[in-house]
């Protein structure tokens, strides 16, 4: 955590969401600082909100190029404050933080297999009017025979302030090497609020009676319907490099979020 990006002028690629404010910002910044294709960039500047940042990280994960976000969206938890001036200096001073995504392998009732990566969380949600019934295993051992709920999710530290926090899950320090397993509107066991698992844990969700109680899986907005089994693990081979202004990195934001 906190290693400085290399100093000196950088070849910057600007990418922006489709909202007007982001597109206008991209035009202004490109005119001021120049612009190169993403494949030729030393740093990528993403303009938008957290959703667009996740899209950018997924789209550029094979490039091993750091991404510096500037908020032109709504929440901007993964973004820095927007300004047209001093961008080269801010990039020189930026601190880099590394995120590893979750790998999801979802098998549907019909037997088709879908794989996806999630930087924030993998969630299972009831697909119809009836509550989902899930069996939960960790590292091959059944830990909960039946969870009746609206859904459940496995969250990374980076995603712990997103959907996980809204479901009353814990906020995780960014360097904790821990995953949060959180229930959404658990009906049985009624008082169960989830578990903290080591980052190395392999988690399996099995949908019980999926014909009557269909379940969908979602990995950073990549959805798979009618799932029967969902296997999730951390993927350390993939490294997402995020840049933050000094004193405003993810670790500080996660701590600050707990005192508001």
Image (cartoon, rainbow, N blue to C red):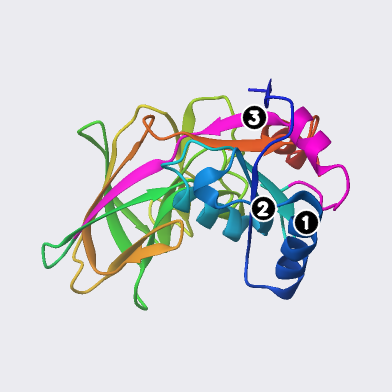
- The answer for how far apart the CA atoms under marks 2 and 3 are is 22 Å
Is residue 60 shown left or right of residue 203?
right
- The answer for how far apart the CA atoms under marks 3 and 1 are is 22 Å
Is residue 232 shown left or right of residue 29?
left
Identify residue for label 2. 35
Q: Are marks 3 and 1 in contact (CB under 8 Å)?
A: no
**Mark toward the start of the polypeptide (3 vs 1):** 1
The residue at the point 45 percent across, 43 percent down is: 61
Frontmost residue, 94 versus 74? 94
User: Looking at the picture, how far across and down is residue 154, in whole percent?
Assistant: 43, 45
Q: Are marks 1 and 2 in contact (CB under 8 Å)?
A: yes
Is residue 237 shown left or right of residue 27?
left
| Label 3 Cα crowd, 10 Å radius (few <14 / some 14-19 / many 20+) | many
The residue at the point 57 percent across, 40 percent down is: 158
The answer, for residue 173, to whether it is visible in the render is: no
Identify residue for label 3. 96
User: Looking at the picture, how far across and down is residue 105, in whole percent?
Assistant: 25, 50
Looking at the rendered image, the disc whose residue lies closer to the viewer, 3 or 1, is: 1
* Label 1 residue SS: helix
Q: Is residue 50 magenta?
A: no
Magenta stretch bounds: 80-107
User: Looking at the picture, how far across and down is residue 31, in whole percent?
Assistant: 78, 59
């Amino acid at each position: 955590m906190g290693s400085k990006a290399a100093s000196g002028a950088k070849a910057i690629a600007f990418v922006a969401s489709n909202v007007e404010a982001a597109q206008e910002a991209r035009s202004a910044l490109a005119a001021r600082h120049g612009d190169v294709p993403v494949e030729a960039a030393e740093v990528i500047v993403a303009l938008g909100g957290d959703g667009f940042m996740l899209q950018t990280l997924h789209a550029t994960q094979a490039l091993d190029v750091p991404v510096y976000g500037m908020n032109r969206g709504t929440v901007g938890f993964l973004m820095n404050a927007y300004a047209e001036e001093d961008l080269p200096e801010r990039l020189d001073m930026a601190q880099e933080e590394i995120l590893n995504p979750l790998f999801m392998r979802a098998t549907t009732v019909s037997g088709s297999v879908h794989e996806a990566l999630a930087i924030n969380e993998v969630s299972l949600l009831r697909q119809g009017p009836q509550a989902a019934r899930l069996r939960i295993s960790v590292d091959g051992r059944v830990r909960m025979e039946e969870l009746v709920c609206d859904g459940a999710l496995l969250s990374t530290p980076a995603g712990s302030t997103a959907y996980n926090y809204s479901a009353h899950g814990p906020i995780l320090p960014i360097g904790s090497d821990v995953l949060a397993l959180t229930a959404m509107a658990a009906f049985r066991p009624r008082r169960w609020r989830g578990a903290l698992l080591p980052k190395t844990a392999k988690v399996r969700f099995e949908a019980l009676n999926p014909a009557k109680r269909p379940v969908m899986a979602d990995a950073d907005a990549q959805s798979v319907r009618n799932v029967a089994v969902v296997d999730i693990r951390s993927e350390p081979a993939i490294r997402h490099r995020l840049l933050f202004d000094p004193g405003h990195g993810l670790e500080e934001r996660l701590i600050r979020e707990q005192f508001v």
